[in-house]
Amino acid sequence: MEDTKELELKDVDLFAEYLEFQMLPTIVASAAQAAGLPAPGKLGKAEWTSKQFKLEVQYPGEIETIQFIRSNGKTCTIGGEKVPPFYSFLGVGKQNPHPPLITYDVFDMGDKMMLPKPIKNEYKDVLGNPAEWAKFAVDKFGAECITFHSLGIDPGTLDWPVSKSKELFEDVLQAVDVPVIIGCSGNKEKDVEMFKELAAMSEDDVLMLSAADKATWEEVIPLAVKYDHNCLLWTSLDLNNQIKMNKDAIELGLPRNRIVMDPTCATLGYGMEYSFSIYQRMRMAGLLGEEDLAYPISGGTTNAWGAREAWMSEKKTPSDWGAREYRGPIWEILNALSLSLVGLDLAMMFHPISAKHMKDITTQFFAEMPETLEDMGYYNWVSGQMKR
């Protein structure tokens, strides 16, 4: 083909691992002349112009700011983002105002639940007393927020009357001065009844009803409106359903600064990619101006303990899985951390060590970037010591 001036191929698929086109000097010269450029070799001496690169990223939207407020003055705040998570490198004035909030799970029937051993070891002395459990989490582990789960009212568990939840919830409110999220059992009829009682008795605070879903939203959202509580709107990994529920909540009178979304937190390795994608799409849509998705996002990262890799005994697992006392907390940390990278504002967590490390890591990510590399600490992997 060396003497061929032109070759035209039709309806040909070309498969190649490496393809190289050689432009002959005469072709280059002809193309340059046609474009009005100097011929090769007549460009003269090259001169470089110094130009500083500046990253200009525009996010016209802003995530709603949500507060949890106790009547004693203790508050927690989430939301308010103007840029994607941990974009500290954009400089002063373009950073997000609040790091992710960690809330510690407390159950009303902890001593009657089949809990993983690492969890029992941490809370063994207080599992039978939700108020003491909550106080223990605040005093020993520095919990800034508590989630009180009323599982015992479910007919499928202990079928307690709602008055029992009311009594235990009152004890929790008296035991701690931090905001308390009102969790439910999963039984729709009993949950609505429970929300009515607990929302009314805590009307002096701004807490959160967790959660309203497609079966209960028409009854739960009005309770949040009536008693001025935040409301968690739960959907199942569906962006359109989340948008619809957010709009429905607005139509029922729930203010924008009382809405928290929960698109479902799948367990790491068991569908995490679905949650990761949905969280990311929601947050980016909100930042790009989609007002129907411009709300903080919550995640039940406690779900990490639903994976057998987190809780299964060493006797039944391969030796390379490692010790269960480390596996579970690490699994939960990675679950929460993965979602925090794409917009998680509120992480509901179980193991106190997981919660502590999640807070420490995100606090480091949230810190302002140093101006020079000399100001940045680095880890010396040889000596195992932090250098400054």
Image (spheres, helix red, strand yellow):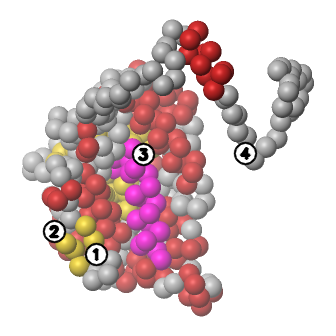
In whole angstroms, how far apart are the C-alphas of marks 2 and 4? Answer: 46 Å
Residue bounds of the magenta highlight:
327-346
Count of labels shown? Answer: 4
Dominant SS type (magenta): helix
Q: Is residue 50 above or below residue 207?
A: above
Point 30% across, 47% down: residue? 86
Please identify the quadrant where the C terminus is shown: bottom left
- The residue tagged with tag 3: helix, strand or loop? loop
Q: Earlier in the sequence, mark 3 or mark 1?
A: 3
Are circles 4 and 3 on residues that touch, CB within 8 Å? no
Which comes before the other along the chain, label 2 or label 3? Answer: 3
Screen quadrant of the N terminus:
top right
Check disc 2 and give the amino acid type: Arg
Which of the pair 357/16 is nearer the observer? 16
Quadrant assignment, res 352 = bottom left
Residue 336 painted magenta: yes
- Residue placed under numbered mark 3 in the picture: 342
x and y percent of residue 291 in the render? 38, 23
First in sequence: mark 1 or mark 4?
4
Question: In the rendered structure, which amino acid carries the disc numbered 1?
Answer: Asn
Report the Cα–Cα distance between label 4 and label 3.
37 Å
Q: CA distance from mark 2 to mark 3?
A: 30 Å
Q: Are marks 2 and 3 in contact (CB under 8 Å)?
A: no
Q: Residues within 10 Å of mark 3 (few under 14, many from 20)?
A: many
According to the picture, the residue beneath numbered tag 2 turns out to be 388
Give the residue drawn at x 49%, y 82%: 324
Measure how far apart labels 1 and 4 are at the Cα level. 41 Å
Badge 4 amino acid: Tyr
Residue 267 is left or right of residue 131, and the answer is right
Tags 1 and 2 touching, CB below 8 Å:
no
Which residue is identified by label 1?
Answer: 380
